[in-house]
Image (tube, helix red, strand yellow):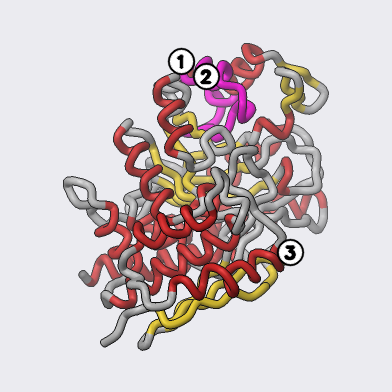
Amino acid sequence: MSKKIKSIKAKEILDSRGNPTVEIEARSENFLVKAGVPSGASTGKLEAKVIDVGQAVKNVNEIIGPQLIGKDPCEQKKIDDFLIELDNTENKSNLGANAIIGVSMAIAKLGAMSKNIPLWRYISQYLEVEPPNIPNIPLAAFNIVNGGAHADNDLDIQEFMIVPQSDSFAENFQIAKDIYQSLGNTLKGKFGEIELGDEGGFSPPISSIKQALNLITQAIERIDTNTRKTKIILDCAASQFEENGKYQIGDSLFSKEELLNFYSDLISKYPIIALEDPFGEEDWQGFQLIYKELGDKVTIIGDDLLVTNPKKIKEAAEKTACNGVIIKVNQIGTVSEAIEAVKLAKSFSWKIMVSHRSGETLDDFIADFAVGVGADFIKSGAPATPFRLAKYNRLLEIEQEICIN
C-alpha cells in the first residue's frame, strides 16, 4: 500500500463570516483528505502572516504542492521544516500562513490515515513526551456571550465562556446547551430577538460586564445541579480597549493597577477560573502585575501576547507573566510548531487551551489536536451553529473512541 503524497491542491472557500479562505485537498494512492483554514478577527501583531487568499491558493498549487509529491506524509516535522525553509521568512509572509497551515494540517490527516489510526492518537504519538499522553477529553469553554471585536454591541470583554465541570464531555456539552438555551430565552424576554456574534454567542444590547455576568450566572444556577458547578472564563482581549497604556471599559479609563482591581473584584463575585489576555499584547508589566496578584487564584492565559510562538512562551515564563497559553495552529503556521509550543508550555506546568478562530470552517482538526496534545481546555465558540458544532461533535466521537479502546 503506497502512502506517498500523490497531489496537493488548494481552492477558495468561505468561512463562517462569509469571507474567503483556503481549503487544501491532499491525496495519496489510497486516501483523500481535506483541511479548511480558519481566520481570526482579533489577531496578535506577531501572528504568522495571512496573505491574499487567491495568492495563497496559487502558491499551494504552483509552488508548494508540486514539491511535496512523492514525500511520506508520516514525516510531519520534516515536511513542516521544508515548508518553513521554502517560505524563508520569519512570519510566513512569502507563501502565506494561510497556505502553509492548510498544507500542514492536511499532511497530518493524511499521515494518520496512512497509519490507520485516529488523528488524535497520531498527534499523541508524535508529541513524544514521557510518559505518553493518556487520551482525555479537555474541558470545553463554550462562548455564550460575545462582545469586543466579535460582536456589534458595547461590551468591551470579547468572550464570556462557561466551563461545565462534569467528568464526561457528553454531559458537559448537554449542560452547556441547556445553559445557552436558558440564557437565550431570558435575553429574548428582555430585549426581543438577539443577534449572534461571530462565534455563536449572544450579542445582547448591553454594555455592563457585570450585567452580562449576572445573566450568565443566573442561567447557570437554573440549569447546573452539579456540586462542582459550571465555571466561567473571560477572554478580555484587552488590546482592543487599550491605548497609550490606559484601558477604556465603558465610560471608565483604567490604569494598570485600576484594571487589576477591576478584575480582582470580578473574580471575588463570580466563579471565574481564568482570564485570557487581561492586558494588551505588548503590556508585559500588566501581565506580570496580574500574575503576581492573581496567578494563584486564576489562570492567566496569553493569546495575543504569545501567538502560539515558543519564543514568546519562553519569554513569558522568564518574566513570570502567564501560567496558561492559547494554542492556535494557524497563529504559528505549522502543526509541528504548534506541538512544540505545547511541549514548551507543558514544561512550565502551564494550562493549555486549544482554540478555534472567529472565522471558522467545518474542519474539526482542532478537536483531535486538543485531545492528542493533552490540552486542559478547548474553546470552539457557542454550542450552536454548524461551524462550532463540528468540533464539539467530533469530541463526542472521540470520547466514544477512547471508551471503546
Q: Is residue 386 visible?
A: no
Which of the pair 249/317 is nearer the observer?
A: 317
Q: Reading the chain from its start, which is encountered first: label 3 or label 1?
A: 3
- Three-letter amino acid code at the position of disc 3: Asn
Seen in the image, is 199 located left or right of residue 223?
right
Count of all numbered marks drawn on residues in the image: 3
Quadrant (top left, top right, bottom left, bottom right) of the C terminus: bottom left
Q: Please state the extent of the stretch shown in magenta in the rendering.
A: 266-293
- Mark number, residue 19: 3
| Residue that badge 2 annotates | 290
Q: Residue at x 56, y 47 (%)?
A: 89
SS under mark 3:
loop
Seen in the image, is 324 located left or right of residue 178?
left
**Residue 237 on image: x %, y %:** 64, 36
Q: Residue at x 44, y 22 (%)?
A: 295
Marks 2 & 3, CB-CB < 8 Å contact: no
Find the distance from the CA under tag 1 to the CA under tag 2. 5 Å
SS under mark 2:
helix
Q: Is residue 1 visible?
A: yes
SS under mark 1:
helix
Q: Quadrant of residue 27?
A: bottom left
Q: Residue at x 68, y 56 (%)?
A: 51
| Residue that badge 1 annotates | 292
Q: Reading the chain from its start, which is encountered first: label 2 or label 3?
A: 3
Task: Check disc 2: other Cα within 10 Å, few if <14, some if 14-19, many if 20+.
Answer: many
Which of the pair 204/190 is nearer the observer?
A: 204
Seen in the image, is 359 located left or right of residue 269?
right
